[in-house]
Amino acid sequence: MVVNKLYFKAGEIASKALKEGIKLVKPGASLLSICETIENRILNLGGRCAFPANISVNQIAAHYTSPPEDTAKIPEKGVVKVDCGAHVDGYLSDTAKSVALNPEYEPLVETAEKALNSAIKWVRSGVKISKISAVIAQTIKKQDFKPVENLTGHEMKRWNLHAGLSIPNIPSLSTNTKLRENMVIAIEPFVTTKKGRGRVEAGKNAYIYKVDNKRRRDPSVKNFVEKYKTLPFASRWVVKDFGKPALNEVKKLVEKGVLISYPVLKEIGRGIVAQAEHTLVIDKNKALVTTKRT
């Protein structure tokens, strides 16, 4: 193995922070408080945030991190997805788990975990991505649920959270690329109910941003590059680091295409969504899980 050991350190940190965040998912709990607790835990453990902690509830599948002064609370019932990541000197991790606050949705959450674990068993050097996708889709459909087709897992490289290859939750002809030894990937099945359409759409709001890699030398984003490097950051981080007026600058830079925004993603049919995720280092004969839960 030639993969840097810091990938495993980042995975351990993210796993511990996720565990702490999951404990806080209770009806009436503040989403903002959960996000900040997870992020502070990552810092206290010696890491840095790979991206803002995401707390996505019910039909919201991904990309919800609390904006500044967020008053949103965990609902009495439903499914809460907690997604976080850490990095150590740019070596990344990404992990997620769902909580069912309504027993009706426990099978949905269990199916996401089952799809993830089934896929991990197939991950090794030389296996086609389409095989991993097929295992995910088959596991989900066997439980009479739907995979979310337009959300995917992803390859990771140092300082690059989404580094080229995608790992879809359904197989396609475009996923015949083979996994390679020492590659680092995140596998993240998203599952929805029969009511759902199996696809997500972008909402009007975005609270997560990133400097466009092609524009990172632009003088207008110098402060953001120095503070956040090439990784995603939250609007509330901007307020904390640069003051509230900086949000207007963020909006202008998004319009100019210098910053990329990540809108909140909702299931098109408004089906409830569950998610499970691990970061893996690919060995010749198996996958090594860096975000193993303890």
Image: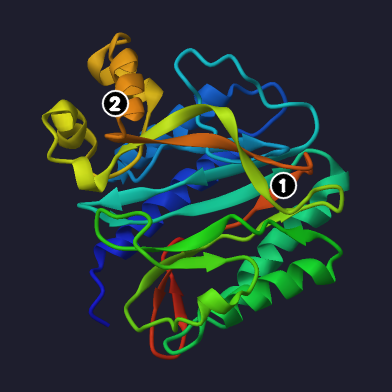
Residue type at numbered disc 1: Val
Residue that appears at 36% across and 41% down: 42
Residue that appears at 63% across and 41% down: 201
Relative to 171, 152 lies left or right: left
Mark 1 secondary-structure assignment: strand
Residue 210 position, x and y percent, is 33, 38
Residue 160 position, x and y percent, is 29, 55
Residue that appears at 19% across and 32% down: 227
Q: Which label's residue is closer to the chain start, 2 or 1? A: 2
Q: Is the residue 101 above or below the residue 8 in the image?
A: above
Residue 80 falls in which quadrant of the image? top right
Relative to 167, 171 lies left or right: right
Residue that appears at 23% across and 53% down: 90
Q: Residues within 10 Å of mark 1 (few under 14, many from 20)?
A: many
Mark 2 secondary-structure assignment: helix
Label 1: which residue?
A: 273
Residue 28 falls in which quadrant of the image? top right
Q: Is the residue 248 above or below the residue 66 in the image?
A: above
Q: Is the residue 97 above or below the residue 227 in the image?
A: below
Residue 132 position, x and y percent, is 58, 77
Label 2: which residue?
A: 253
Relative to 117, 126 lies left or right: left
